[in-house]
Amino acid sequence: MTPDMLYTDALHLLQALIARPSFSREEQDTAAVLMNFFHERNIPAKQHLNNVWAVNAYFDPAKPTLLLNSHHDTVKPNPQYSRDPFKPLIEDGKLFGLGSNDAGGPLVSLVATFLHFYDQPNLPWNIVLAATAEEEISGFNGIEALLKSPDFILATNPVGETPYSNWFAIVGEPTQMQLAVAEKGLLVLDCTAHGKAGHAAREEGVNAIYAAMDDIKWFRNYHFEKVSPTLGPVKMNVTVIQTENKAHNMVPASCQFVVDIRVTDVYTHEELLDLVQQSVRCDVKPRSLRMRATGISPSHPLVAAGIALGKQSYGSPTCSDKALMPFPALKCGPGDSARSHSADEYIYLSEIEQGISGYIHLITLAMKPH
């Protein structure tokens, strides 16, 4: 296919995806759009839950495998939208619509890249395309479920070998096509401070809010000793606080708050959790230990190729499905992360065009013998 044909297909696909709501766990309509897109091109795509995947025509399990992955779920529209979030309008060189930037632009650019390589014989790598669900909520039925699916494992891995032992990935997220070689992990803590209920007028009880404030002060002020050379310091933020009280005159017996911790590669989740529990008085429960900090070697062919093409590498403060992959992954894609989840989200048409050509040049160069 010519570059113009790839771009046109990608643009039309993105418009079709925007037009169908695809909130996390509700991606069935966009999964159907993707399945139909591949079937119209005689590519035998498959679906597991709301995850759609396909392999290149000359797939050889003995070769290394490059996974091209991005997500087709979205958050709910920002309440400040002034446009219909599901109407894919083009104005002033921009395509507007929910999910256009995060991560529709990267997704359709990867789909076009997959089409470019799909029927090329004698590639040194296999190429697998996976458009996955539930990324925005770090759900269990997205990339994690697909990688555990027996059908996917059987179709894409050598029989008798450890699955994914010779895999690597490009994760499509809006990075302005720069190279996110490292990514912070996520640790969310549910904390409960305890007091004793009493009547506010009689100054009875022990106020759990005040107990919570002492621990919140620690979360606000504590600085971790080790700093990552690529991801910087660990960051902690208290993001939610509440009590069960509805009455103004009741001293609360408990106060719940949530802490968002962005974890770097110099600490494990377990180390941070242990330090927190030793430092505060409240009860601390982690929601999950799944979203680990990740990195890919600067010498990996994908990274080396990107640097040779003049791209910059950096450590990303945000999480993606890269955290759930048991193999090296590079986060890279068209669009700007600053637009993600914003009102009147958009992506420039030129960014999609450049995303397609950028991915193709990056992979082509990375495949060359070194």
Image (spheres, grey):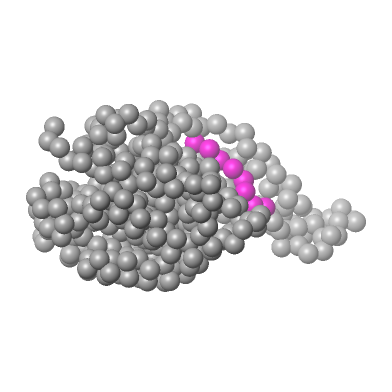
- Is residue 270 visible from the viewing direction of this image? no
Left or right, 34 with respect to 118, comes to: right
Relative to the observer, which residue lies in front, 363 or 206?
Answer: 363
Snapshot quadrant of residue 316: top left
Q: How far across and down, in percent of the image, does residue 132 sit?
A: 36, 61
The region drawn magenta spans 234-241
Q: Is residue 53 above or below residue 193?
A: below
Dividing the image into 4 quarters, which one contains the C terminus?
A: top left
Snapshot quadrant of residue 362: top left
**Residue 150 painted magenta:** no
- Residue plotted at (17% across, 65% down): 154
- Residue plotted at (73% across, 50% down): 209
- Residue plotted at (42% across, 58% down): 14
Dividing the image into 4 quarters, which one contains the N terminus?
A: bottom left
Snapshot quadrant of residue 312: top left
Q: How far across and down, in percent of the image, does residue 24 sit?
A: 48, 64
Relative to the observer, which residue lies in front, 299 or 148?
Answer: 299
Relative to the observer, which residue lies in front, 365 or 352?
Answer: 352
Q: How far across and down, in percent of the image, does residue 125 sit?
A: 16, 48
Q: How far across and down, in percent of the image, does residue 198 sit?
A: 81, 59
- Residue plotted at (49% across, 36% down): 234
Left or right, 271 with respect to 205, comes to: left
Relative to the observer, which residue lies in front, 77 or 105?
Answer: 105
Left or right, 329 with respect to 183, comes to: left
Number of numbered discs on residues: 0
Q: Main secondary structure of the magenta part?
A: strand
